[in-house]
């Protein structure tokens, strides 16, 4: 993998900014493709280029960034590795707003295990490829290509009648892999919301949406979802709001094995109360799914804490027809410390798997802590756990534990170093079999500023994969490179 600098213009100070990043590196690896029996060591030359541009004014913001690397290997192979491009545009007026966004990325999934910035945040826990708790990949290699766009338009924000339109599409495909769990998918969605502000206390709404999901899996899944509904929000008191919603939903799934249809009413009743330091809410919802009617009762509380801390938590229960009652819970706590920060998240919720329509219970937990150890040494640690339990005949359960710790030290004004270790353990069990994979990683890096704003970067990384059903794999790689960043304000 080339040393691609991920450039961004998200934190620009306004006006026009342009950043250009260039780099050149040499990397030596004894198992560059992370295979069981590597045949030769590889020396790779990588030339990277990154570009970020932004133009921000009081009413609009345009941002564009792209980067990639061209790799040449000693065995004659060449590749344009890990390219990506992102574009966004926002325009806001007194009574309307427009948002546009698009993105493209091509990722070598073996390399993605270490470079967490290459894992898109939209990866779902039900996808065997990525874990949203920490973003550490768990796949057997290959190349993933993601494309997506979204359009949002809203008008009448200050009028009695408001209108909002949302369009989005996302496609994902894979090459250079034989893993049956990695297959191409495409999702398209349209949503329309019309709001009627009858008086300061009552707001009514009409909703309509459609979504289509297509997958090139073994069953050639083609799912269409439609929904038409209405809702109303009442301000019963200055600090108390009652919200009612009713919709007609239909889901049709076509597969090689046959067609299934779910059609019925969905409704939600919710009460929210504003408190001096946050909010408290309770809601009940019921909807038809492909597994039967699912009913959910949930209560939640969010609050601000001293010293800019935040805390939110919730409890509830859910039940799908034919299955047992399951508890739901959530917790999110974040507290800036005098010298660092600490955060915890915990949740359990019910979902339906896109691939096989099974009802699942998803449990996730994560914690992170960061603090300076000395004036020149910073330490951070993060841990995550995820568990996906399928409610059905297969009884499949997938558990994943991730742990990452990093040290970053400042040697002097022109040089710094970093060290990181990663542990990931994945276990998939059914009534008949159990599979387990463990990944260990080590990263070391040293950066030194040279003349004329050039940086020298040296890196070492080690990967060990222990698999209960496949051959173990190991890899060592060292690299040395030069990087330079040019900043302009046209």
Image (tube, rainbow, N blue to C red):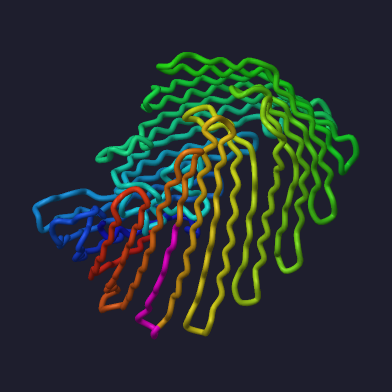
Q: Residue furthest front?
A: 432
Location of the N terminus by quadrant is: bottom left
Res. 266 image quadrant = top right
Is 142 situated left or right of 286 in this image? left
Relative height, residue 209 to residue 396 (above, below): above
Relative height, residue 28 to residue 84 (above, below): below
What residue appears at the point 47 percent right and 41 percent down from the top-left corner?
A: 89
Nearer to the camera, 468 or 297: 468
What residue appears at the point 63 percent right and 15 percent down from the top-left corner?
A: 263
- Percent of width and height locating residue 260: 53, 15
- Percent of width and height locating residue 29: 20, 63
Is 137 situated left or right of 43 in this image? right
Relative height, residue 278 to residue 295 (above, below): below
- Percent of width and height locating residue 443: 35, 68
What residue appears at the point 79 percent right and 34 percent down from the top-left corner?
A: 270
User: Total of numbered circles in the picture?
Assistant: 0
> In the image, is residue 415 part of the stretch drawn in magenta?
yes
Res. 370 image quadrant = bottom right
Location of the C terminus by quadrant is: bottom left
Res. 413 image quadrant = bottom left
The magenta-colored residue range is 411-424
Is 369 situated left or right of 182 in this image? right
What residue appears at the point 45 percent right and 52 percent down from the top-left corner?
A: 426
Residue 185 appearing in the image? yes
- Percent of width and height locating residue 171: 39, 33
Residue 490 appearing in the image? no
Q: Residue furthest right?
A: 237
Give the main secondary structure, helix, strand or loop, of the magenta stretch.
Answer: strand
> In the image, is residue 144 part of the stretch drawn in magenta?
no
Nearer to the camera, 250 or 19: 250
């Amino acid at each position: 993998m080339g040393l691609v600098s991920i450039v961004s213009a998200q934190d620009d100070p306004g006006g026009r900014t342009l950043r250009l990043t260039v780099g050149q590196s040499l990397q030596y690896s004894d198992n560059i493709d992370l295979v069981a029996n590597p045949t030769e060591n590889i020396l790779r030359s990588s030339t990277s280029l990154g570009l970020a541009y932004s133009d921000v004014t009081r009413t609009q913001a345009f941002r564009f960034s792209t980067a990639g690397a061209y790799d040449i290997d000693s065995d004659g192979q060449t590749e344009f590795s890990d390219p990506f491009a992102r574009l966004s545009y926002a325009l806001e007026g007194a009574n309307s707003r427009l948002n546009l966004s698009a993105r493209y990325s091509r990722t070598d999934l073996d390399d993605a295990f270490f470079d967490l910035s290459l894992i898109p945040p939209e990866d779902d826990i039900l996808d065997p490829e990525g874990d949203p708790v920490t973003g550490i990949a768990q796949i057997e290699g290959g190349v993933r290509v993601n494309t997506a766009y979204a359009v949002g338009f809203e008008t009448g924000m200050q009028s009695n009648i408001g209108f909002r339109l949302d369009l989005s599409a996302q496609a994902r495909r894979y090459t250079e892999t034989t893993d049956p769990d990695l297959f191409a998918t495409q999702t398209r969605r349209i949503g329309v919301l019309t709001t009627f502000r009858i008086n300061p206390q009552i707001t009514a709404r009409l909703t309509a949406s459609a979504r289509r999901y297509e997958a090139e899996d073994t069953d050639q899944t083609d799912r269409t979802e439609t929904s038409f509904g209405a809702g109303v929000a009442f301000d019963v008191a200055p600090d108390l709001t009652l919200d009612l919603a009713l919709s007609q939903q239909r889901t049709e799934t076509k597969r090689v094995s046959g067609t299934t249809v779910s059609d019925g009413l969905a409704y939600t009743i919710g009460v929210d109360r504003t408190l001096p330091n946050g909010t408290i809410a309770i809601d009940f919802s019921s909807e038809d799914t492909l597994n039967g009617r699912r009913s959910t009762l949930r209560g939640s509380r969010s609050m601000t804490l001293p010293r800019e801390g935040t805390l939110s938590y919730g409890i509830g229960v859910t039940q799908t027809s034919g299955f047992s009652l399951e508890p739901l819970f959530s917790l999110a706590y974040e507290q800036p410390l005098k010298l660092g920060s600490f955060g915890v998240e915990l949740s359990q919720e019910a979902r339906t798997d896109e691939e096989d329509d099974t009802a699942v219970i998803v449990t996730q937990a994560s914690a992170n802590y960061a603090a300076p150890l000395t004036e020149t040494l910073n330490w951070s640690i993060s841990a995550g756990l995820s568990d996906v339990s399928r409610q059905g005949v297969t009884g499949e359960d997938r558990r994943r534990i991730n742990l990452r710790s990093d040290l970053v030290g400042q040697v002097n004004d022109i040089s710094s170093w970093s060290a990181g270790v990663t542990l990931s353990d994945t276990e998939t069990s059914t009534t008949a079999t159990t599979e387990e994979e463990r990944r260990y990683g080590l990263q070391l890096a040293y950066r030194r500023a040279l003349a004329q704003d050039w940086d020298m970067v040296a890196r070492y990384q080690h990967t060990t994969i222990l698999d209960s059903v496949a051959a173990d794999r190991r890899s060592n790689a060292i690299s040395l490179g030069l990087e330079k960043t040019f900043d302009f304000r046209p």
